[in-house]
Image (spheres, rainbow, N blue to C red):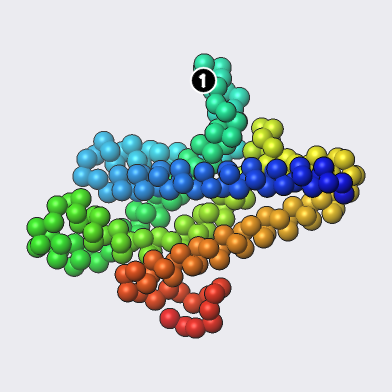
Amino acid sequence: MSSGLWLRLLDGLLVTLQLTAYGAVLGLVFAFAAGIARLSSNRLVRGIAFGYTEAFRGLPALVVLFWLVFALPGLGFQLVPLFAGVVALSLNIGAYGAEVVRSAILAVPAAQLEAATALNFTPWQRMRLVVLPQAVVTMVPPFGNLLIELLKATALVSLVYLQDLTFQGQIVRAATGDTAMTFLGLLVGYGVIALVLTVLMRLLERRVAASVGRVARPGLLSGRTA
């Protein structure tokens, strides 16, 4: 394969990594905002958060992406394709992440909240100093799974002509005529990225667990039991 085709794949890899990184950050914002809002005492706030999570968990990311890229311009709004891809993916992954946040917060023992209340902590102080530090430990493993799902979903942007790894792989396939090796290369490429992300998330899990005095789950990085 010529150097030009290798450069195409490298360019596509960079776009895929950008989509994954930006989508993860924005998805995390949506997840925490909606997850905490689901527990609000304000019915309107709870309703908006519930509507968002249920809507975007039910809507295919591809349909949302098509709407942002092809339908939204008809309403007078034109998004940069990369930004549209990030928004579509983060809205979808953020809806799933919101349920992770909500369930992790609810899993914090009630005694912890009672102790914080006895110390005259405000609701914000209870959330920031007591609840979230413990809940985040529970959130990290499922967030790692969602990050891998986000990586796999980035392949959808090739359908709106965004030149990610899958899109560039299609160009390489057309140029070389070697379908089997091209798609094998894509499988290996996505697999390696997923493995790296898994290792990084496991390291993060251990660091977060250590910060609150817990032992992380055994697994990829160690054979020791908890």
Residue on which the image places disc 1: 77
Q: Quadrant of the C terminus?
A: bottom left
Q: Quadrant of residue 195?
A: bottom right
**In this view, 216 is above or below 19:** below
Looking at this rendering, what residue extends furthest in the front direction?
3
**On screen, residue 186 above or below 92:** below
Q: Residue at x 80, y 39 (%)?
A: 171
Foreground of the two, 83 or 38? 83
Looking at this view, is 61 or 31 the one in front? 31
Q: Residue at x 58, y 44 (%)?
A: 18
Q: In this view, does 129 lie to the left or right of 22?
A: left
Vertical side of 105 occupied by 153: above or below: above
Residue 153 in view: no
Secondary element at tag 1: loop
Residue 89 visible in the shown view: yes
Q: Is residue 50 left or right of residue 163?
A: left
Q: Which amino acid does label 1 sit on?
A: Phe
133 vs 6, nearest the viewer = 6
Residue 77, horizontal then vertical, whole percent: 51, 20
Q: Where is residue 116 in the image (x, y as percent from the top left)?
A: 15, 62
In this view, the residue farthest toward the right is 177
Left or right: 166 as drawn, with respect to 106: right
Q: Residues within 10 Å of mark 1 (few under 14, many from 20)?
A: few
- Position of residue 203 measured from the top left corner of the image (x, y, whole percent): 49, 67
